[in-house]
């Protein structure tokens, strides 16, 4: 009946079920349930023009914003277990919505870095750039935002957050050592590193219950070998 169809639709939408047919079962029914796992190739944003997501997304893969590309996320995004978002050097990600786990947890966002200055040189940056606008939320991640990658040797990823929320992450934001030197000639100051380009304004860091994460709570913000990151009007709360 129409009522039964409505109830089935409500159940599937509310519980975010995903059923697919694969070679492992000869593309036949019954379909396999894979909503929590990565089973698709990495989704790459590789476009010379800015890309905007405006409709809710449920991903079954990692998401990679390639160098030179810009992605605006204006809708809720649900990530699979161990799924990650990578922002490559000279790529930009702007978030104005919630990114969370489909089921238990996700790995988080990696803003990759690189050697040298965080300033724009010849139209590009050696690091990735993440902007979190008011209403942005990162939830249920192992490390919400990791400002280096693939290893700590490629550090200096940039994060500017205003009115954002980090909730129930084992680590909300993590930095690796980085010296931000002025890249241009004629520097009127002494040759000391400049402040790390990163700031938090009116942001909330909240930790309550995180039973579904594979690791326990460690820190809201982890910093090592960085200088000049600013926090203004931020709230740190352990509920």
Image: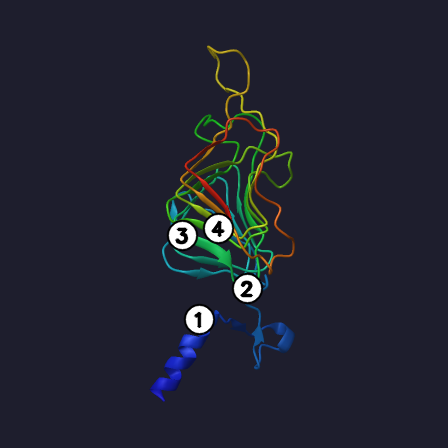
Task: Residue 202: give x, y in percent of width and height.
Answer: 40, 40
Residue positioned most to the left: 2
Residue at x 50% of width, y 44% of height = 66
Frontmost residue, 161 versus 187: 161
Cα distance in 3D space between marks 3 and 1: 18 Å
Q: In whole angstroms, how far apart are the C-alphas of marks 2 and 4?
A: 14 Å
Q: Which residue is mark 3?
A: 97
* First of labels 1, 2 by sequence position: 1
Mark 4–mark 3 distance (CA, rounded to whole Å): 9 Å
Q: Which numbered disc flags the more N-terminal residue, 4 or 3?
A: 3
Indicate the secondary structure of the residue bearing disc 4: strand
Circle 3 — which element? loop
**Comes first in the chain, label 3 or label 2:** 3
| Quadrant of the snapshot with the N terminus | bottom left
Marks 3 and 2 sit apart, C-alpha to C-alpha, by 18 Å
Q: CA distance from mark 1 to mark 2?
A: 12 Å
N-terminal of the two: label 1 or label 4? 1
Residue 233: give its label: none
- Residue located beneath label 4 in the image: 138
Colouring scheme applied when the structure was drawn: rainbow
Q: Categorize mark 4 by other alpha carbons within 10 Å: few (<14), some (14-19), many (20+).
A: many
Q: Residue most toward the front? A: 239
| Badge 3 density bin: few <14, some 14–19, many ≥20, Cα 10 Å | many
Which residue is under mark 2? 103
Whichever of callouts 3 and 1 sits on the residue coming sooner in the sequence is: 1
Q: Which residue is mark 1?
A: 14
Q: Helix or strand or loop: what does disc 2 sit on? A: loop
């Amino acid at each position: 009946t129409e009522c039964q169809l409505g109830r089935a639709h409500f159940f599937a939408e509310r519980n975010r079920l995903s059923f697919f047919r694969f070679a492992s079962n000869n593309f036949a029914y019954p379909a396999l349930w894979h909503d929590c796992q990565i089973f698709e190739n990495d989704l790459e944003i590789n476009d010379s023009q800015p890309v905007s997501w405006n409709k809710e997304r449920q991903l079954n893969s990692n998401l990679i914003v390639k160098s030179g590309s810009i992605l605006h996320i204006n809708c809720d995004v649900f990530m699979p277990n161990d799924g990650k978002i990578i922002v490559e050097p000279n790529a930009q990600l702007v978030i104005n919505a919630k990114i969370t786990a489909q089921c238990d947890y996700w790995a988080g966002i990696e803003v990759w870095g690189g050697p040298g200055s965080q300033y724009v040189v010849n139209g590009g940056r050696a690091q990735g750039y993440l902007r979190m606008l008011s209403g942005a939320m990162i939830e249920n991640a192992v490390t919400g935002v990791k400002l280096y990658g693939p290893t700590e040797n490629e550090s200096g990823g940039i994060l500017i957050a205003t009115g954002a929320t980090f909730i129930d992450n084992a680590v909300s934001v993590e930095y690796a050592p980085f010296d931000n030197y002025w890249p241009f000639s004629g520097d009127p100051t002494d040759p000391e590193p400049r402040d790390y380009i990163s700031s938090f304004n009116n942001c909330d860091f909240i930790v309550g219950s995180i039973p579904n994460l594979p690791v326990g709570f460690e820190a809201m913000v982890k910093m090592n070998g960085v200088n000049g990151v600013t926090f203004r009007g931020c709230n740190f709360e352990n509920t």
